Image (tube, rainbow, N blue to C red):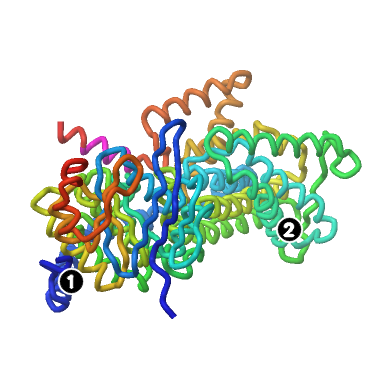
Amino acid sequence: MAAEGSPTEAESHHEHSSMRNALAETASPRQAPMRATGKLRVSALVTILAFCAALPFISPPDTFEFTIVLAVGLAGLGVALLLEAGLISFGHALFYGMGGYTVAALAPVFPRFGILLLLFGGGVGAIVAAIAGLFIVRYRGVFFAMLNLAISMVAYSVLLKSYAISGGSDGMVVQVQGLVGQALGPGAFGRALFYVCLGSVIVLGVLLQCYRRSPAGWGLGAIEDREIRIEYLGVSANRLLLQAYVISGFLGGFGGAVAASAVGHVAPDDFFWTTSTVLVVVAVLGGRGVVGPFLGAALYELLSIAAARYLSNSWEILLGAVILLVIRFAREGFAGLPDTWRAASLQWRRQ
Amino acid sequence: MKAAPALEAEHLFLSFGGVQAVRDVSLTVATGEVLAIIGQNGAGKSTFLNMCTGYLRPERGAIRIAGCSIVGLKPRAIARLGVARAFQHPQIFPQRCVIDHLRFASAAARPGFWNPFRPLNSPQSAQDVLQLLAFFALDKLADQPVRGIPEGARKLLDVAMALALEPKLILLDEPTSGVSSAEKLGLMTRLVHALRARGVSAIFVEHDMDVVARFADRVAVWVEGAIFRVGSPEDVLSDPEVKEHVL
């Protein structure tokens, strides 16, 4: 009875083959526009990167600001990664500050090997994230956000009180003199740091994109939709989140290490909640994805410069207005504007 | 040595507040067997499936999958033992496209899932994913986000995801609800054929007695949290007491 109406093996095989062929035939026209869009995006990305590489020559005095944009963008990328799981961290200053203090602590040991120091900064960020993450990734929503904030503020207080180790509220001077073994003058060091940072952004961006396209990266985004289904597929949602959290910690630590090397000083304020908020704002302004947070960081820096010039005492008004506009008209952030416009245009045509 | 049954449930009890949802349920499903569970709404059918997949823990009793006790295990640990589940209301990811659901489920069943450099669309699983898409006639919807596809297709995708895990035991909660009556028998014919070809045991909760009669090896009738009858579809569905209480 149970086998009644069952197709034979041969029929089934023939059916599968014909369906596969049909799928292959229909795949090409369907994928053609996607390939064109992909090529357009790659071209735009290459153009942006070429422009970035030329910035120190276009405006040499602003090389420091460009480096800070990349550093904050890297840390914001870590926050944006967690946003893919629908989780917001108000404590990523912890990793940003850890990266900076690691450079400050190790710079006297490796003063001319700045690249090594940046990697150490990222590594410490990842280790701290792995330890804190074991606890934090068990929570969702507001609890996740607040636990991150709490831990970063604990670190802030400890640093503030540990004057002998951290210099207390005065912070520490960061004495990095070179990147790959040779001592450099301030101008040359600034330019070299910018290019090392730009190269790191490209490498880390490619690696992160690989991760986002892996099953674990896909699963991270699916946590927001339906976490229980992931568990029913035999995958631990907490482990997915921990993996992302460690990557996020590395990015935060690396960004903090770059910023500390560029600024030449670290202070407990790097751990303060306002720094975490900046990283969240950068992620929200730029949008999800690998490019978004760098656009967000650039916009944030531009806003800071414009506000310092025209609204020095109330620049939060300008920032607040821009955030409101982004939330109202570009939910996916600046990186998502093309998609937002395309969707709006389609809807308008249908109406 | 005789192989352990695919599922053994012994003297299960579970209550919610004052309501006894499951009362002294004992059930065995042999390897390769297809068992249908029928009963009125609220009889405890889905609660039983929830206990078998670790979502709910029985107050008393034992559940073994292929001889391994699963009481107290989390859903993911039970899934790794080879138990897959499809839901009455499809549990899928609305923002994601159809084909990626199957790629993810297929990746979850294979080694290398945690490799961050392994693409979701890996060559190892690509063929299986295409076969599943074709098998459930979802190939034309492959690139569409699931929030825009019909309810019947969502249901099929939910079942396809469960099958992509290459399970030893599959639990299907009303697999044909939401599927049009014209497609219902065709779907079940192909599904049960696929399960039998792979030697997969199955439990399916169903309200359509025609589907039950055609595809089940055995039928368990549930009334008020307890098993009322178990037997072949011919015997059970023609039982006057079953007709009176359930049908």
Q: Quadrant of residue A266?
A: top right
Q: Could you tell me which quadrant the N terminus of chain A lies in?
A: bottom left
Tag 1, which secondary structure?
helix
| Left/right of residue B203 with respect to residue B134 in the rendered view | right
Q: CA distance from mark 1 to mark 2?
A: 55 Å
Disc 1 is attached to a residue of which chain?
A
Residue drawn 44% across the image and 49% down it: B12
Residue placed under numbered mark 1 in the picture: A16
Tag 2, which secondary structure?
helix
Identify the amino acid type marked 2.
Leu
Question: What kind of secondary structure does the magenta stretch mostly adopt?
Answer: helix
Q: Is residue A16 above or below residue A322?
A: below
Q: Position of residue A264 (x, y in %)?
A: 76, 46
Confirm whether the magenta stretch covers residue A88.
no
Disc 2 is attached to a residue of which chain?
A
Q: Do dots 1 and 2 share one subunit? A: yes
Residue toward you, A270 or A176: A270
Res B192 visible: yes
Residue drawn 45% across the image and 42% down it: B14
Give the residue furthest to the front.
B240
Q: Position of residue B229 (x, y in %)?
A: 27, 52
Q: Are marks 1 and 2 in contact (CB under 8 Å)?
A: no
Q: Position of residue B163 (x, y in %)?
A: 31, 62
Q: Which residues are magenta?
A: A338-346
Q: What crowding class fits label 1: few (fewer than 14 Cα within 10 Å), some (14-19), or many (20 or more)?
A: some
Mark nearer the viewer, 1 or 2: 1
Residue drawn 42% across the image and 71% down it: B4
Residue placed under numbered mark 2 in the picture: A117
